Image: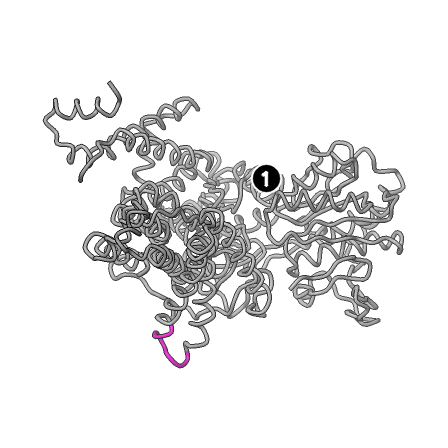
Amino acid sequence: MSARSGVLAAGRDLALSPALLRWLLPFGSIGAGLLAFGAFVLLIGRDPLEVYATIYEGGFGSAFSWNNTLLRAAPLILAGLAVAIPAQAGLVMIGGEGCLAFGALAAAAVAVPLLPGLGSGALVAGAIAGMAAGSAWFALAGVLRVRRGLNEVISSLLLSYIAIAVFNHLVEGPLRDPASLNKPSTLPLPESAMIGAIPGLDVHWGLAIGLLACGLAQLALSRSTQGFALRVAGGNPRAALLVGLPVGSLVVASCALGGAAAGLAGAIEVMAVHSAASASVLAGYGTTGILVAFMARQQPLAIVPVAVLMGGISAAGSLLQRRLELPDATTLVLQGLLFVAILAGEALMPRGRR
Amino acid sequence: MNPSRRSLLRAVGATGLASGAGLPLNASGQAPITVGVIYVGPRDDFGYNQAQAQAAAALKKLPGVKVVEEERVPETIAVQKTMEAMINQDRASLIFATSFGYFDPHMLRMAEKYPKVRFAHGGGMWTEGKHPRNAGSYFGYIDGAQYVSGVVAGHLSRSKRLGFVAAKPIPQVLRNVNAFTLGARSVDPSITTRVIFTGDWSMAVKEAEATNSLVDQGVDVVTCHVDGPKVTIETAEKRGIMTCGYHANQSALAPKGYLTGAEWDWSTPYGMLVDAARTGKPHLNFLRGGLKEGFVRMSPYGPSVSAKAREAGDAARAALTTGDFAIFRGPLRDNRGGTVIPAGTVLEMTHLELEKMNYLVEGVLGSIPG
């Protein structure tokens, strides 16, 4: 008996439907991952219960912890979406960091000069510029895929390196604020003009924008003709071509939308957090987004809880270091074990119609 | 602890009864304090972060001082939340934000939000009137130590070619490249320093490539200014050339070729800042020092340093320690032939002009990209 049919059988015994199992399994996986982490903690001679309590306190135990977690999750939502949308067309885009870089740069270059004339409209212009820049860069990988059959995993990664190099060149050269001596940056937005916090929370509006984007993406995929066509193109390109779907355009469009999400993430980082584009903006969100999207099984709505989990681990890791003097690598072990457990859980997941 | 109890304790401490009564005060009547220290990289990187962590370890030994640390904190919203968490969850009242990129906007924003907490930033340019009073920056004039390294390297180089693996062409880095070169050329004006910029603070592969390339070009002493000098020093040792360290003591990585090195001694400013916070003195907003003030120091000489080179190194260090000698004085030309400091002008270590350095001095082979 295979492991999967074993789970199904166990589910039947407990009178659980496959649909309910599908919902329960991720929680079981997280529990298993936490147990494995507890064993690891024991192995290094620490008290697992104390570690669990600290993880809870750091990530989810108070209003402060929730704000901390959500703030860390905010950029990961859009970065995850950048991978999940092209994935509907069957593409694995791993160069999100490059789109994020261009989005950040475009937002800084557009919003700052427009600010005196447009006021807060400059932020909208910055966001649009960021989306356009990220979108164009990812679309390039899509076009190379459609026209030249170039593998998008490689091309998007290499394009990302180019984008980061161009970003560094412009930030340290032509676009550099001469006053930024030892931290080369573009001209900054004044603090008062930046994207503020959501009322009642200590989290900037980027979180709400990410949630909205995920909701819209989910809706478009499941309810619109184009979304359906995209999924068909991704599921079976040959069949899609046979029924007359414009597969090439769908592939490029999905890349463009994904790139727009990553570009928007970069734009929001500049306009809500950093005030200017500098090397600090490129903190690896684009790369973490790949992990988030795969954990969410490329489902836009599922990206939200996964990103929150990632944010929570990061916030908890911060407290683990300070309270229990565990090294930062502990956080990586926790993250690794949780994700291996979730992926293993998915392998046991009942397949078939949803 | 509420204020009245704190002031009571201070009064008791002042009368010298504290130790006898077993109260949490040390002999000078200082209140207990929780200090947060934040690093951008790992604490054991043989470099920038390790130098800061050594000072934090020294603080931990002081009675009444609790230290909470967090490593590998990126220069994003994460560092703002770490500062806030140290304040809210650990009750820290003094925070050391050690990475340059933490200053603007992250630390400044937190300093405005938490006016009662003191913030100290490594390397930043705190400016009177522009930045909050509860924020400040501490830094060291490490170019003095680099100059001494250059003198020692100048004595021991046979090929007369030195190498410098540098991260970014920013003023701090250029100052070190230039000071090292001027030190070496004070021994022999025919010496040149080949500089390679890797483009970022932690680029292990590029640092190894740069070091190998320098060795291939005939360089026989190499030093660096990157976050973790480990790769450069180890690669150079493997290739059989000599090295001068940076940030921390790397002699363990190069037992044969390590000559000396420019090290931070952050325990000096850390101690001063903690002391001010515990005794209620104003925050030290702009704290600087060099060899003289004990903010920087030299690694002990390695086995391959000759007696003559030691003597020259010691003499240079003594001159810089007494302050009789300034590294940057006119006439000084850059490596493109232009005069950067006219004859008769002496720029003391503390001169703000030096913090805007944007040239490579004569004798440096290489150019500032961009």
Along the line of sight, the residue nearer the viewer: B187 or A36: A36
Left or right, B354 with respect to A163, comes to right
Viewer-proximal residue among A126 and A88: A88
Count numbered badges in the picture.
Answer: 1
User: Is B156 within the magenta?
Assistant: no
Residue visible at 89% across and 53% down? B188
- Identify whether A5 is placed above or below B156: above
Q: Which residue of the protein is positioned furthest toward the bottom in this rendering?
A: A117
Residue that sits furthest to the top in the current view: A1
Q: Answer with left or right where residue A99 lies relative to residue B185.
A: left
Residue at the farthest front position: A242
Magenta region, residue range: A116-122
Q: Which residue does the image show at 63% across and 56% down from the upper left?
A: B168
**Is residue B94 at all visible to an observer of this figure?**
no
Side of B226 where A116 appears, left or right: left
The residue indicated by pointer 1 is B45
Q: Could you tell me residue A343's position as x and y percent?
A: 33, 33
Task: Give percent across and percent down for residue B18.
Answer: 46, 39
Q: Residue at point 48% right, 36% down?
A: B19
**Residue A148 visible in the displayed image:** yes
Looking at the image, which residue is at 37% across and 79% down? A118
Q: Quadrant of residue A332?
A: top left
Relative to A152, does residue A3 appear above or below in the rendering?
above
Residue type marked 1: Asp
In-image side of B12 versus B237 (left or right): left
Secondary structure mostly taken by the magenta-highlighted segment of the chain: helix
User: Does the magenta portion include A118?
Assistant: yes
Taking depth in this image into account, of A303 and B126 the one nearest to the observer is A303
Chain letter for mark 1? B
**Viewer-side residue, B5 vs B257:** B257
Helix, strand or loop under label 1: loop
